[in-house]
Amino acid sequence: MTKILNIDALAKEDRVITLEGVTYPIKDVSVEDFIRINEMAEEADRKENPTTSDRVLFLAETVFISVPTCPRDILMKRSLNELNMIAAFARDGTLPEDEVVETLDEDGKK
């Protein structure tokens, strides 16, 4: 008997964010992305006195990796609270309790 793990056939939950009326898909974090983010974190940890700006730039960089089709200037205009929400949603699908969630079918229709 042969056992097959068909990764391609596994159900996948697509996640998207909408900013300024445009929808951007959230990319699953690849092994390459994970390593890159961890290297960035290790580099940030080596900094003797990281500033708040350093921490926010690190967060923004992780979001850029997760939402690569969204222009940087669109993400950089977000509030810190919005950036944190996007990062949490990209990381594990966490949604704020008061947020409206739209469920779309496979064709992207409500």
Image (cartoon, helix red, strand yellow):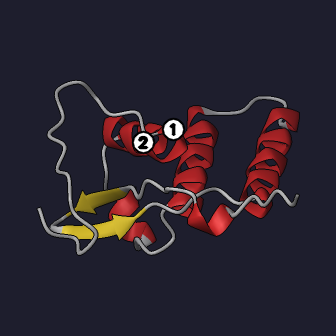
Image quadrant containing the N terminus: bottom right
- Nearest to the observer: residue 105 or residue 95: 105
Q: Quadrant of residue 65?
A: bottom right
For residue 89, which numbered disc appears in the image?
A: 2
Image coordinates of residue 79 in percent, x first then y, are 31, 43
Left or right: 29 in relation to 96 = right
Q: Residues within 10 Å of mark 1 (few under 14, many from 20)?
A: few
Question: On the picture, is 8 further left or further right than 77?
Answer: right
Residue under pointer 1: 92
Q: Residue at x 56, y 41 (%)?
A: 53
Q: Nearer the viewer, residue 51 or 42?
A: 42
Name the foreground residue: 10 vs 70.
Answer: 10
Q: Secondary structure at mark 1?
A: helix
For the view shown, which residue lies furthest in the front direction? Answer: 1
Asked if the residues shown at circle 1 and circle 2 are in contact, with their CB atoms under 8 angstroms apart, the answer is yes
Left or right: where does residue 72 sit relative to residue 98? right
Residue 32, percent from left and from top:
79, 63
Q: Secondary structure at mark 2?
A: helix
Q: Amino acid at mark 2?
A: Phe
Q: Quadrant of the C terminus?
A: bottom left
Q: Is residue 106 above or below residue 90?
A: below
Q: CA distance from mark 1 to mark 2?
A: 6 Å
Residue 97 screen position, x and y as percent: 23, 24
Amino acid type at image mark 1 = Asp
Which of the labelled discs sits on residue 26, or is there none?
none
Q: How dense is the environment of label 2, judged by Cα within 10 Å: few (below 14), some, or many (20 and up)? A: some
